[in-house]
Image (cartoon, helix red, strand yellow):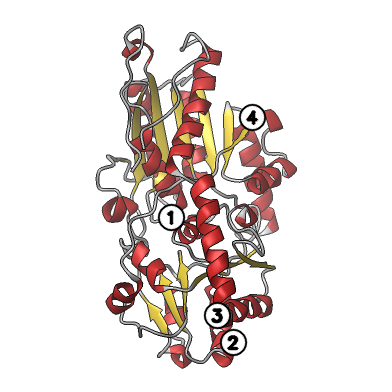
Amino acid sequence: MVTARRRTTGHDPRARRIRVMRVIARMNVGGPALQVSTLMRGLDEELFDHRLYAGHVGPDEADYVDQRAPDVRVRRVPTLGRAVRPTDDLRALAELTTAMRAFRPHIVHTHTAKAGALGRAAAKLARVPSCVHTFHGHLLQGYFSPAKTRILVQAERSLAAVTDRLVAVGGAVRDDLLAAGIGRPRQYAVIPPGTTSAVPPPRSEARARLGLPQDGPVVAYVGRLTRIKRPDRFLTVAREVRRAVPDARFLVCGDGDLHGELAGAGDLRESLHLLGWRPDVETVYAAADLVLLTSDNEGMPVSLIEAGLAGLPTVATNVGSVAEVVQDGRTGLLAPPDAGELTRHTVELLRDAPLRHRLGQQARTYTAARFGAERLVRDTHDLYASIAVARGWWPSPAQPKGVNR
């Protein structure tokens, strides 16, 4: 865990403490919640007074705070959730505005699309000096009709005009947003996710916990079961892999509105294990031989970072910033959103243990160096410091940087 670090400086650091109000629609299990939790734990409390505001998760979602971050304090805004309801959204806007006027943040930092819209609108009403927004992905492809996407793009362009800094989790995400005319290049900072891995149980113990045989190949899927993630494509790949590797098993760690589609796959009943959300996701990685991702659109999937830290290779669709996590041919194998090619890659790795192990070891080395929690905290600290210096809140750019391990 990354922890805040106290520092001794030549004058009282609290005289220059920056107040940061962080807003996210909901803390459901996934990359945005993990990133927010890491920042809430890791930013130096002598330099930053930061508060987190969020709505509640949906009925088909698991709460990241309950499962993995009970130490992170969340101030709840009941009407700030996933669904778009004009009356609730207006109430959320009013509550956020009131909270900002009371807290008087120097910086409002929003995460996810809905919180980005309501949080930045509230910041404008409350006359907050500076706004930052993080794009953990984008909604430009695969979510809405062309007409709705055009409306979304126009809204994001308008919001970018009142935002000091835009954060993208990957270079590809930034480039897609810029191509859509959202923001200007100098507004953007690329800050990839950062995390730490829990100590996994031994492979034999992990398989016993999950009711799996000790031998035989295991493929894991970790994430939401929703349309953009293409669980239908996952099922197609699983069926084809079973034809080539009859003893293969498939773990699905997650839930969502398309859970029934997987639960109804009777032909895979003996080989498909639906685990739901689990707080011990490290057990899933410890039991698996590789991780499979079948999405049509992604930001930078934290599940692939976790897989790499666990020493697992990945077979994934080459969408969003996936290629910035998975180095094709070195830490995993990438494919277009095509079930046939995903199947070929999966079968190749399941049949070639030396290749699988080599890619897994390289994945561990690469992800540990690039996607550590300390790096995320340091990059975010530096972003806030640049704003504080530009605004005159901090007297010089030579501010302390590091964080404890």
Determine which residue is flagged by label 4: 187
Indicate the amino acid at tag 4: Gln
Q: Determine the CA span between mark 2 and mark 1.
A: 28 Å
Circles 3 and 2: CB atoms closer than 8 Å:
no
Pair 4/3: label in front? 3
Q: In terms of sequence position, does the residue under pointer 4 or pointer 3 come before the other?
A: 4
| Residue 327 falls in image quadrant | bottom right
| Residue 318 falls in image quadrant | bottom right
Q: In terms of sequence position, does the residue under pointer 2 or pointer 1 come before the other?
A: 1
Circle 4 packing at 10 Å, graded few (<14), some (14-19), many (20+), is some
Determine which residue is flagged by label 3: 350
Pair 3/1: label in front? 3
Question: Which residue: 52% across, 39% down?
Answer: 117
Q: Determine the CA span between mark 3 and mark 2.
A: 13 Å
**Mark 1 residue element:** loop
Indicate the amino acid at tag 2: Glu
Determine which residue is flagged by label 2: 240
Indicate the amino acid at tag 3: Leu
Pair 3/2: label in front? 3
Question: Which residue: 70% across, 44% down?
Answer: 175
